[in-house]
Amino acid sequence: MIKYILQRLVYGFFVLLGVVIIVFFLFQLTRINPERQIAGEKADKATIENIKKELGLDLPVWQQLGLYLNDISPLSWHNNSDTTSRFYLNSEKYQYFRVLNIGHTSMVIKKPYLSRSYVSKRSVSEILSERIPNTLVLALTAMIFATIVGITLGVIAATRPNSMLDRACTTGSVLGISFPSFFVGIILQLVFAYLLASVTGLNMTGDLYVTDGYTGEQYLELRNLILPAIALGVRPVAVITQLTRSAMIDVMHNDYIRTARAKGLNERVILFRHALKNALNPVVTSVSGWLASLLTGAFFIEAIFNYNGIGYETVNALKMFDYPVAMGAILYTAVIFVVISIAVDIVYSIIGRRVRIS
């Protein structure tokens, strides 16, 4: 297993490297005078030149790429003596642990440095670290909702094939896949947070943490999580329901299920201990893929509900041409996909005896 994990980490490294290079050059093509964004329209030429030098924008593109890769890499090389060097090991800029010194060059293990926002001047890592927990809570809540509801409906439909209940679950899953998440979000807003607001007590928009207008204190507002989580989880519910139903119907016709029934085992034990466990492989694949998508693709939902997560921050960054924030969010997205793909294969080896990591 260790060998496999190392192989996947190497594969993930090259995936991330490819993503960074492609995104870097795409933003290079669309970049619109970031030095003007920082200094303002009335800044003099000397100020503009200083900002360009600070950001490395006066360098050739390939050198800018090398500098960016060195900054975001956890293991990097820096000059430890020349303060004018673009690779100078600045303790105010990097959080690092020195590993090796060779002359005036040091190899360090550090926290990836994602530059600073052009608009707020804050560290991109700091901005994303404030938004990521909100998105994690939203995505995990939506995924838990989708998994529980989807598996339940799938099992119910599989145990009563071709019945009215089965047809209702199948029809509902098709409708769930057909409607985009943002459309479901708008409908939920209109019905439960506007027309039925006096009954449900739900808000049309709102963040997970709300600031009190009088005291300035923040408090947790879980009800603002309900509608976004349901809207985000509707499509995964539909997919998980169909996958669970198909896998369960297939497993229920296997010889070991008939043997278990012949031995007089309780139907509930057969269903959940033997059938469902062996039917979970395709469901795990779906859950893992959807979880990665929900973590990184909740842009419209967060925008509709004014939910202050990483998707909402990325949309605002693109509107303001704040490229460091947008690039940092995309890199975060790629890391999530790589980590989840490795985790899924490990889970496979645990829940399915036929799956082995070599």
Image (cartoon, grey):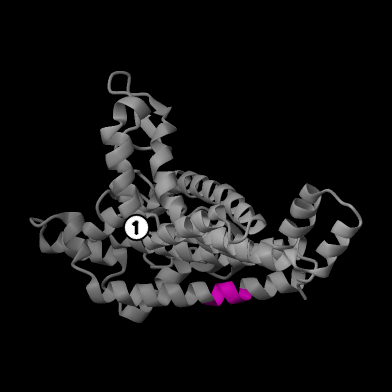
Name the residue beneath numbered marker 1: 325
The single residue placed furthest to the left in the displayed view is: 42
Return the x and y of residue 138 as percentages of the image width and height. Answer: 46, 45
Between 254 and 348, the one nearer to me in the picture: 254
Between 56 and 46, the one nearer to me in the picture: 56
Q: Main secondary structure of the magenta part?
A: helix
| Mark 1 Cα-neighbour bin, 10 Å: few <14, some 14–19, many ≥20 | many
Return the x and y of residue 326 as percentages of the image width and height. Answer: 34, 61
Q: For the point 13% across and 55% down, which residue is it? A: 40
Left or right, 273 with reference to 147: right
- At label 1, which amino acid type do we have? Val
> Which corner quadrant of the image does residue 157 belong to?
bottom right
Left or right, 164 with reference to 231: right
Left or right, 39 with reference to 248: left
Between 173 and 306, the one nearer to me in the picture: 173
Q: For the point 73% across and 66% down, which residue is it? A: 251
Q: Which segment did they paint magenta?
A: 10-14
Left or right, 212 with reference to 353: left
Q: Is residue 211 magenta?
A: no
Return the x and y of residue 43 as percentages of the image width and height. Answer: 11, 57
The single residue placed furthest to the front in the displayed view is: 163
Q: Secondary structure at mark 1?
A: helix
Return the x and y of residue 111 as percentages of the image width and height. Answer: 52, 56
